[in-house]
Amino acid sequence: MNDDNDITNADLEYYGDTDPHYSMSINLGAEYKGFDFSVFFQGVGQQYNVRNGSMGCAFWRGWTNTSSYWIDNTWFEGNEYQNANTSAKFPVASRNGSRNNWNYKQYNSLNVVNSWYLRCKQIQLGYTMPKSVISKTPFSKVRVWISGSDLFDISNVADGRDPEALQTSGAYSGVDVYPSSVSLGLDITF
């Protein structure tokens, strides 16, 4: 790092910490002629995450899945079936655990990601029936709605991992997934 041709503590570089910096959120809503709409976004402008665990690199363990993020992004010398990729972004992906340990499991600039994201945490669209429609029923209010939680995010995290996940997500017990849900509802007030 300091160009003195010796590897010493002077070559260490501080990558940052895992605390979220520049936290942000926005909550918007509108109503018009019985329709109501609300949306809530939440995000972080800077957070350093260490990509380790079972999805930290291609073939972390022989029995784990490999993210498509690694395809065509790792060094490859080529063979009779596939062209070489010697200017790849990442080192060689191997089924050899010692080689992967050296290339990917040690803290380095490849597995420390300065991530940012903005996630749609909640979005809802509803319609409240006019009083004239429900006046002859025992109901005082009827509202129909559809709601979505964690439907999408905008992020610089390209490997498919959840930008909100802890640094050790996917560590041997599985991969933290990015769960989304859509709900339909009917609110009736007597």
Image (tube, helix red, strand yellow):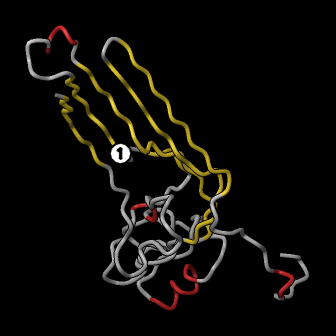
Q: x, y percentage for residue 142? A: 19, 24
Q: Is residue 173 left or right of residue 114?
A: left
Q: Is residue 117 left or right of residue 95?
A: right
Query: For mark 1, does the 10 Å Cα neighbourhood hold few (<14), some (14 to 19), or many (20 or more) residues?
Result: some
Is 128 situated above or below 179?
above
Is 103 situated above or below 86?
below
Tag 1: amino acid: Ser
Which residue lies under the disc numbered 1?
A: 149
The quadrant holding residue 182 is top left
Q: Residue at x 35, y 23 (%)?
A: 36
Q: x, y percentage for residue 25? A: 56, 42
In the current view of this chain or complex, which residue is farthest to the top? Answer: 132
The quadrant holding residue 67 is bottom left
Is 164 situated above or below 18?
above
The quarter of the rendered structure image containing the C terminus is top left
The quarter of the rendered structure image containing the N terminus is bottom right
The quadrant holding residue 59 is bottom left
